[in-house]
Amino acid sequence: EADIYQTPRYLVIGTGKKITLECSQTMGHDKMYWYQQDPGMELHLIHYSYGVNSTEKGDLSSESTVSRIRTEHFPLTLESARPSHTSQYLCASSALDWAGSGNTIYFGEGSWLTVV
Amino acid sequence: DAKTTQPNSMESNEEEPVHLPCNHSTISGTDYIHWYRQLPSQGPEYVIHGLTSNVNNRMASLAIAEDRKSSTLILHRATLRDAAVYYCILNTGANNLFFGTGTRLTVIP
């Protein structure tokens, strides 16, 4: 069972508000990811991290930002939410394995964000 | 991009076996084949993975073609709880794993 947790699971906020989606994992994984997924659509990587103080942008451009001050914590922030940010945000983690690709990726249950 | 091709949807009767196909003709020698599934309103969960040999676990079996250009996820007895979107992905160790839209499995009671 995955030990990766996201909060909040559901959030409705007004346009212009600042929000932070929390993600924590207790597996000691170095790699963490944020994906964005609209209903019935593909997952798109928006941010990832190799470890503490490492953050990189993914393939899908996003107005969100992330930080990685502790290994277990990878929050995502939207400084000024807009209706176009309405989506599901999925946090994930995996062990760091430069050589191979057999490592499992563990996903949280997702955070559903609605901006009105 | 190491991409895969899957049918958009499949149906199965409850308690019958299900074979979910996946094509990955651009696979390279070190790419692992991973399968995940996503239940409604949840994040994807790991099902199984393999490199060259067929694999079995408590959830499913993975049959990998000899040339590795295709694979099949086998659910031996589909239950209603197996209704989900199933993703076949190539794990190259790179940062971005292409999940695609997967195969939506409907299980008919």
Image (cartoon, rainbow, N blue to C red):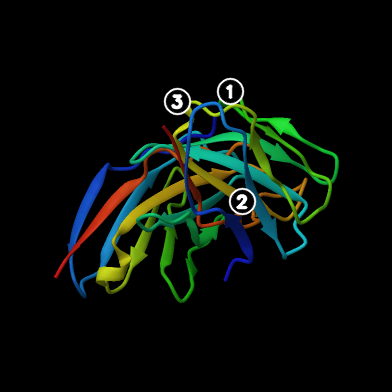
* Label 2 crowd bin: few (<14), some (14–19), many (20+), radius 10 Å: many
Q: Amino acid at mark 2?
A: Ala
For residue A92, which numbered disc appears in the image? Answer: 2
Query: Upstream in the sequence, badge 2 or badge 1?
Result: 1
Q: Amino acid at mark 3?
A: Ser
Contact flag, marks 2 and 3 (Cβ < 8 Å) = no
In the image, residue A74 lies at what x, y percent?
A: 71, 47
Q: Amino acid at mark 1?
A: Ser
Front-lying residue, A84 or A46 = A84
Residue appearing at x 78%, y 52% in the figure: A30
Query: Rounded to the nearest whole Å, what is the CA distance between mark 1 and mark 3?
Result: 13 Å
In the image, residue B41 lies at what x, y percent?
A: 39, 54
- Identify the element where label 1 is drawn: loop
Query: Upstream in the sequence, badge 2 or badge 3?
Result: 3
- Identify the element where label 2 is drawn: strand
Q: Which residue is mark 3?
A: A84
Front-lying residue, A109 or B92 = A109
